[in-house]
Image (tube, rainbow, N blue to C red):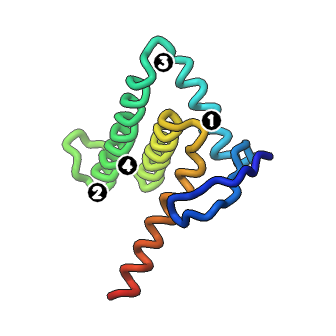
Amino acid sequence: MDRTPARTTRTGIAEPIDRRSDGDPLWDNIEKLSAVCRAAGAHLPDEALKALQIGKVAEEAGEAMHALHGLKGLTTCGDDHTWSEVQNDLVGSVIAALLAMHYIDPTGTRATFDEIPHRRTRRGREAAATA
């Protein structure tokens, strides 16, 4: 396990970061799926693959919204949907987003994903404390 210290933008303090697969099924599957998708798009430039994957996030989110409209009877095509279908499409959005992040920075995706929620929740805590 590579636990080389790395500086973080959050604290500026050297912290160990595990850069190897730690057996986390979600990240292991994202890495495998990324390899399959990259192989399928091998004929495209890397920047095009990144852009297309980011577009896939929007597509999947749109499918979740369509399912929600169907659930609420707001579609004109008579589609009936369930909360389970909405959740399925939301998970598709999450997977597409994680793949997009992996396309952008294959070796730093996990650290970035861990850092951003921490930073966002810290801002929320600080804002709540001053209110």
Q: Which residue is mark 3?
A: 41
Which one is nearer the viewer's eye here, 127 or 67? 127
Label 2 crowding class (10 Å Cα cut-off): few <14, some 14-19, many 20+? few
- The furthest residue to the top: 43
Say which amino acid is labelled 4: His
CA distance for labels 3 and 2? 37 Å
Say which amino acid is labelled 2: Lys
| Chain-order first, disc 4 or disc 2 | 2
CA distance for labels 2 and 1? 36 Å
Q: Residue at x 64, y 38 (%)?
A: 29
| Chain-order first, disc 3 or disc 4 | 3
Q: Which residue is mark 1?
A: 31
| Chain-order first, disc 3 or disc 2 | 3
**In the image, is 41 to the left or to the right of 28?**
left
Image coordinates for residue 109, horizontal then vertical, percent: 56, 44
Identify the secondary structure beneath mark 2.
loop
Label 3 crowding class (10 Å Cα cut-off): few <14, some 14-19, many 20+? some
